[in-house]
Image (cartoon, grey):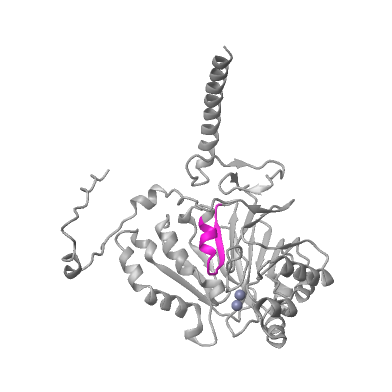
């Protein structure tokens, strides 16, 4: 008797659950290319869950979500890959600031709609800031993008040191890879459109569309050709510092930022111990090429954002304590030291900082019908010589009929 009741209840439970899920899914489908079996829900009154589970939350129409995809160094670790930030807006637009080495894995773990990830803004051409650009180009093309990818980036002191030359070089280097995929993947997804702009421009517009304005200004780092960006939309402002020594442009143009990110490098002694460098080399790199924590604090005390975000270190417990000690000597405002997959939700009323919880074996995201239907021409095959080497001892199964 007891068993029977239990069965009846659980069947009812399933039925009710199914109806609810379907209803929410229909509403969500229009806004999100949602993975199978997930039903994103709206967050009411700033009551966010403690962790961010990708594709479970609808972004509010007035809301911005910033995800740190990479916060580490060129010598990336499993917990801290190189620099990248994803910015998602309530109007459906997405922007990527830098695509450092290793950041593609973290981006992929969010199972995003790759058809919408077609804009990258490069702060400079160090490998820890653009090393996964081709990974995003090809991986995104494989995973749902059927239109060109756009990269925005600065000139250098000579043409061969600029963003355009970087992209042309990458396309030459990956000629074989790109050739193998044409025909199999959507034709237009192969294209890279470069928007190179003068690294010297001061707070001038780099991008303006759909209510979103992105500006750049010079940064001081290694050589000419490093910049910072601001993104403004719907009365919200995010600043991405890239790599820089503390500079007057950042102090001036990052003002009024809701979220201002800026590097907070390891202080000299900690850097020396971490890399096994001598103190003079560590002091040079930490305080002349980058921004050490006390300098970061001074910058943020001037800018006074609603939230200051520091990044560009490997956060061992010792390193973290050293960074925090330094920053707190010179800045007592709101602060987050970014870690990989840290998520910041921003509205006019609240700023919520959480960690994303992702599946290490995340499946590829679903693709749109437009991706499936996009034209694919000029499929490539090996030549006669290689074809003639096919072993007669194996016959592949017949190809299934096209649906
Ligand atoms: Zn750099
Ligand atoms: Zn860097």
Residue that appears at 52% across and 22% down: 11
Residue that appears at 55% across and 69% down: 100
Whether residue 301 is visible to the viewer of this picture, yes or no, is no
Question: From the image, which quarter does the C terminus lie in?
Answer: top left
Residue 77 in which image quadrant:
bottom right
Question: From the image, which quarter does the N terminus lie in?
Answer: top right
Q: Could you tell whether 62 is left or right of 31 in the image?
A: right
Compared with 195, 56 (above or below) is: above
Whether residue 298 is visible to the viewer of this picture, yes or no, is yes
Q: Where does the image place residue 324, in percent across and percent down from the top left?
A: 77, 67
Numbered circles on residues, count: 0
Compared with 163, 32 (above or below) is: above
Compared with 300, 359 (above or below) is: above
Residue 321 in magenta stretch: no
Viewer-proximal residue among 386 and 141: 386
Q: Where does the image place residue 349, in percent across and percent down from the top left?
A: 74, 51
Q: Where does the image place residue 94, in percent across and percent down from the top left?
A: 55, 58
Q: Could you tell whether 28 is left or right of 294 in the image?
A: left
Residue 106 in magenta stretch: yes
Residues in magenta? 92-108
């Amino acid at each position: 008797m007891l068993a029977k009741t239990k069965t009846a209840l659980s069947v009812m439970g399933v039925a009710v659950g199914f109806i609810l899920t379907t209803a929410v899914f229909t509403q969500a489908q229009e806004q999100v290319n949602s993975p199978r079996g997930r039903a994103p829900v709206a967050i009411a009154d700033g009551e966010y869950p403690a962790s961010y589970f990708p594709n479970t939350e609808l972004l509010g129409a007035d809301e911005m979500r910033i995800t740190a995809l990479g916060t580490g160094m060129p010598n990336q670790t499993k917990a801290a890959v190189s620099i990248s930030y994803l910015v998602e807006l309530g109007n459906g637009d997405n922007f990527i600031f830098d695509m450092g080495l290793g950041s593609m894995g973290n981006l992929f773990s969010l199972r995003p709609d790759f058809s919408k990830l077609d804009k990258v803004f490069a702060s400079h051409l160090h490998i820890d800031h653009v090393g996964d650009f081709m990974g995003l180009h090809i991986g995104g093309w494989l995973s749902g993008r059927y239109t060109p990818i756009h990269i925005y980036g600065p000139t250098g002191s000579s043409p061969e040191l600029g963003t355009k030359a970087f992209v042309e070089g990458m396309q030459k280097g990956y000629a074989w890879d790109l050739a193998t995929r044409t025909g199999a993947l959507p034709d237009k997804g192969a294209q890279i459109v470069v928007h190179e702009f003068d690294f010297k421009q001061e707070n001038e517009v780099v991008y303006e569309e759909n209510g979103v304005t992105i500006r750049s200004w010079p940064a001081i780092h290694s050589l000419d050709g490093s910049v910072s960006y601001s993104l403004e939309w719907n009365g919200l402002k995010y600043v991405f510092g890239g790599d820089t020594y503390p500079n007057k442009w950042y102090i001036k143009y990052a003002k009024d930022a809701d979220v201002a990110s800026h590097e907070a490098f390891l202080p000299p002694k900690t850097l020396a111990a971490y890399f096994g460098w001598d103190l003079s080399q560590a002091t040079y790199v930490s305080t002349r090429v980058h921004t050490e924590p006390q300098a970061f604090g001074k910058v943020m005390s001037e800018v006074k954002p609603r939230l200051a975000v520091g990044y560009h270190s490997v956060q061992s417990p010792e390193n973290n304590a050293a960074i925090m000690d330094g920053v707190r000597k010179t800045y007592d405002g709101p602060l987050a030291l970014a870690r990989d997959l840290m998520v910041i939700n921003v509205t006019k009323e609240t700023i919520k900082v959480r960690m994303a919880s992702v599946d290490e074996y995340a499946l590829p995201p679903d693709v749109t019908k437009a991706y499936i239907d996009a034209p694919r021409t000029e499929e490539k095959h090996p030549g006669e010589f290689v074809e003639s080497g096919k072993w007669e001892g194996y016959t592949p199964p017949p190809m299934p009929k096209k649906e």
